[in-house]
Image: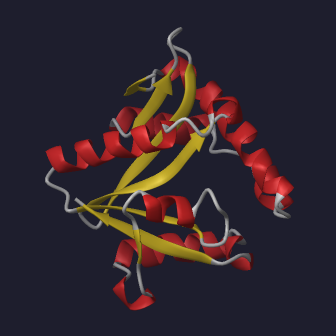
Amino acid sequence: MHIRSVRIDELPALQDIERAAGEGFRDIGMPEIADDEPLTLGELARYHHAGLAWVAANDADTPVAYLIADRVDGNLHVEQVSVHPDSARRGIGRLLLDHLAAQARSERAPALTLTTFTEVPWNAPYYARLGFRLLDDNKHTPGLREIRRREAAHGLDRWSRACMRREL
């Protein structure tokens, strides 16, 4: 398994990975999340062109997972990380997050941030094992408050969500 920048022709594969990974939400009573469409090809292309999209590729150089990020308030923010279920539980998500951390260090960013569901085992509890810590609402930066506002408008606050931060 190796991490590399996504190629523009692989963007549809990212959508497929996200759809497959989202099916796990159906099994825990969150079918709306499973049914939510991935980002459009145009939105994914924006991450590609910004140099903020990476894949974990197998020995055949086929993407099995991906991570896209934004720059938010001086940090790198995990917008999406998805691992295809056929490749899950092998440390691939951790590899992608560690790659992002290395990128953040090279940019002298002090932390990684993300928003996540607090009660989904492969969300907040997983990120906590990787060194992310829950942020109190009063510690949200302006950019994180805007992200949470957009998530609420999209209906994601139906389930408990939080911001997390990993110091670098």
Q: Position of residue 118 (x, y in %)?
A: 60, 72
145 or 84, nearer to the observer: 84
32 or 48, nearer to the observer: 32
Q: Position of residue 79 (x, y in %)?
A: 48, 53
| Quadrant position of residue 120 | bottom right
**Residue drawn at 55 percent across, 66 percent down:** 124
Quadrant location of the C terminus in the rendered image: bottom left
The answer to whether 98 is drawn above or below residue 12 in the figure is below
98 or 31, nearer to the observer: 98
**Residue drawn at 38 percent across, 27 percent down:** 5
Q: Position of residue 149 (x, y in %)?
A: 55, 77
**Residue drawn at 54 percent across, 18 percent down:** 9
| Quadrant position of residue 82 | top right
Way the structure is coloured: secondary structure
Q: Position of residue 27 (x, y in %)?
A: 85, 54
Q: Is residue 161 left or right of residue 31?
A: left
**Residue drawn at 84 percent across, 54 percent down:** 26
Q: Is residue 21 left or right of residue 140?
A: right
